[in-house]
Image: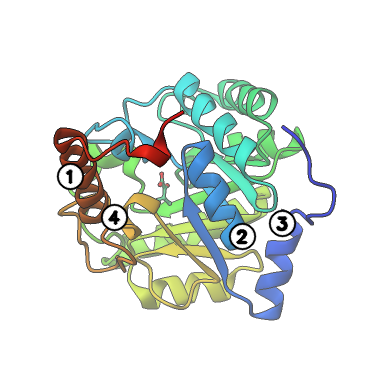
């Protein structure tokens, strides 16, 4: 990766300062070099190389099938395109649940082979020892609570989590445990806005919400969803900024028509 020395890199400390100063953190997913370049140039604070690549890049129904090698390929591509933002990489399902050593080994592979700056994993008390081990090896860790898609078969549905008191209480405890274990930030996915507010106010580290209301310290969306590439996926929390599916389809349709008619290439488009 070529390093542009004039660009000041966003770090985990930058995010902490943003929380303290009341500046919201912007985060989007990306999985490849070209989109990472555009998103970074637009000024995003954090790119998450999410295991949602399993869905939007590979067409799987869940995030479970994506492998560590595949995540490393996506993350290394993103890092080559991101000059300014912090790049966080998801540890995929099966790469950390076994034990703390497996979690650390997977993290080391990501850090060495991609050049990314931090990792994210899902869960609370169940993975807190892994968080401690990774942090003690010097790697920043982002936590992820609420709807944790790697546990979809336990939940059974993608509906809002922690509406019941018992699950909300566990989530609040888990958030504090993850903070104590050394996480630099937490993703809160699909939980009631009031609960996200309470958790955000109880922590000194930033929270980044997806379907968790406006009181988190930042927001994250899956890039393909907010650009309208993921046709038919319109959950209530999603704001769609572009209808890219239709725009790309129209452009490709025009190209096909131009090729068929012989209009492309014209005199100026040849040697
Ligand atoms: O994989 C992903 O895209 C994520 C976000 C939804 C937070 O974990």
Identify the element where label 3 is drawn: loop
Q: Residue furthest right?
A: 5
Q: Which mark is residue 10?
A: 3
Frontmost residue, 237 versus 270: 270
Residue 222's spot in the image, x, y percent?
Answer: 38, 52
Mark 4 to mark 1 CA distance (whole Å):
14 Å
Q: Indicate whether 218 appears above or below 88.
A: below
Q: Which mark is residue 253?
A: 1
The part of the image, by quadrant, that contains residue 43 is: bottom right
Q: Earlier in the sequence, mark 3 or mark 2?
A: 3
Q: Earlier in the sequence, mark 4 or mark 2?
A: 2
Q: Which mark is residue 141?
A: none
Q: Disc 4 vs disc 1: Cβ atoms closer than 8 Å?
A: no
Residue, disc 2: 45
**Location of the N terminus (image quadrant):** top right
Q: Residue 96: tell me if it is visible.
A: no
Q: For the residues carrying marks 4 and 2, which lies nearer the camera in this image?
A: 4
Judge the density around disc 1: few (<14), some (14-19), many (≥20) Cα neighbours within 10 Å: few
Identify the element where label 1 is drawn: helix
Q: Earlier in the sequence, mark 1 or mark 2?
A: 2
Q: Residue at x 54, y 64 (%)?
A: 26
Residue, disc 4: 244
Q: Earlier in the sequence, mark 4 or mark 1?
A: 4
């Amino acid at each position: 990766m070529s390093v542009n020395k004039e660009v000041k890199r966003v770090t985990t400390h930058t995010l902490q300062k943003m929380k303290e100063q009341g500046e919201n953190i912007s985060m989007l997913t990306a999985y490849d070099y070209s989109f990472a370049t555009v998103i970074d140039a637009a000024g995003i604070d954090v790119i998450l190389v999410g295991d949602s690549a399993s869905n939007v890049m590979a067409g799987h129904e869940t995030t479970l099938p994506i492998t560590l090698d595949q995540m490393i390929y996506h993350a290394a591509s993103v890092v080559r395109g991101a000059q300014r933002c912090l790049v966080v990489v998801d540890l995929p399902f099966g790469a950390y649940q076994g034990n703390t050593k497996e979690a650390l080994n997977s993290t080391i592979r990501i850090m060495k082979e991609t050049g990314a700056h931090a990792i994210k994993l899902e869960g609370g008390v169940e993975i807190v020892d892994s968080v401690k081990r990774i942090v003690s090896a010097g790697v920043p860790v982002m936590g992820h609570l609420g709807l944790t898609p790697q546990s979809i078969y336990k939940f059974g549905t993608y509906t809002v989590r922690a509406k019941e008191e018992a699950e909300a209480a566990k989530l609040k405890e888990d958030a504090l445990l993850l903070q104590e274990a050394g996480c630099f930030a937490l993703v809160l996915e699909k939980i009631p806005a009031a609960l996200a507010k309470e958790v955000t106010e109880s922590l000194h580290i930033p929270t980044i919400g997806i379907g968790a209301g406006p009181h988190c310290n930042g927001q994250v969306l899956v890039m393909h969803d907010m650009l309208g590439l993921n046709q038919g996926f319109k959950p209530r929390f999603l704001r769609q900024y572009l209808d890219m599916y239709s725009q790309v389809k129209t452009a490709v349709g025009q190209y096909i028509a131009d090729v068929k008619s012989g209009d492309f290439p014209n005199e100026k488009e040849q040697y």
